[in-house]
Image (cartoon, rainbow, N blue to C red):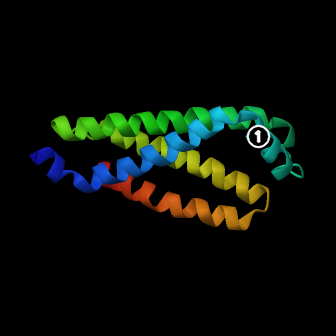
Amino acid sequence: MNNLLNNITEIILLIFLAITFLQSGIDKILDWNGNIEWLKGHFSKTFIANMVPLNLGVILILEVIAGVLAIVGIFTLILDSNTSFGFYSAIFSAITLLLLLFGQRLAKDYEGAKTIVIYFIPTIITLYLLK
């Protein structure tokens, strides 16, 4: 119980990352074709227009890795205050969000880019707390 209380901030942040990235990954898996179609239109005027399926696959893999590491990180923090898995989750989360931010900026979707920053802030806080 002490590990839980001593690491509650980090655990709550990792729950946030797990929810964010696993839900997003599951959505991509369940509606792959819908995501592809929407993103093809979104990036139609960019140099990555022909790479949408590949890029979506990369993002999907990174999101799932970030989410799974967050879940493992929660348990290792509770069991023995080990921060390694949570730290790696925050790294994968930050990389994923930076790639998404790059895509939104490339597509000139500045409102979408602002939204990503909202997710980036707790991710960086998590990274800082678990380093």
Instruction: Estimate the x, y position of residue 94 in percent, counting from the top left.
Output: 51, 49
Q: Is residue 112 left or right of 83 when viewed as pictured?
A: right
Q: Quadrant of residue 60?
A: top right
- Identify the residue at image location x=51%, y=58%: 119
- Identify the residue at image location x=72%, y=51%: 103
In what quadrant of the picture does the N terminus appear?
top left
**In the figure, 100 relative to 75: above or below?**
below
Q: Is residue 110 left or right of 82 when viewed as pictured?
A: right
- Identify the residue at image location x=38%, y=40%: 70
Q: Amino acid at mark 1?
A: Gly
Instruction: Estimate the x, y position of residue 46 in percent, counting from the top left.
Output: 86, 50
Instruction: Estimate the x, y position of residue 123 in percent, counting from the top left.
Output: 44, 54
Callout 1 secondary element:
helix
Q: Quadrant of residue 111?
A: bottom right
Mark 1 — residue? 34
In depth, the one of 18 and 127 nearer the eye is 18
- Identify the residue at image location x=36%, y=37%: 71
Q: How many marks?
A: 1
Q: Is residue 6 left or right of 20 when viewed as pictured?
A: left
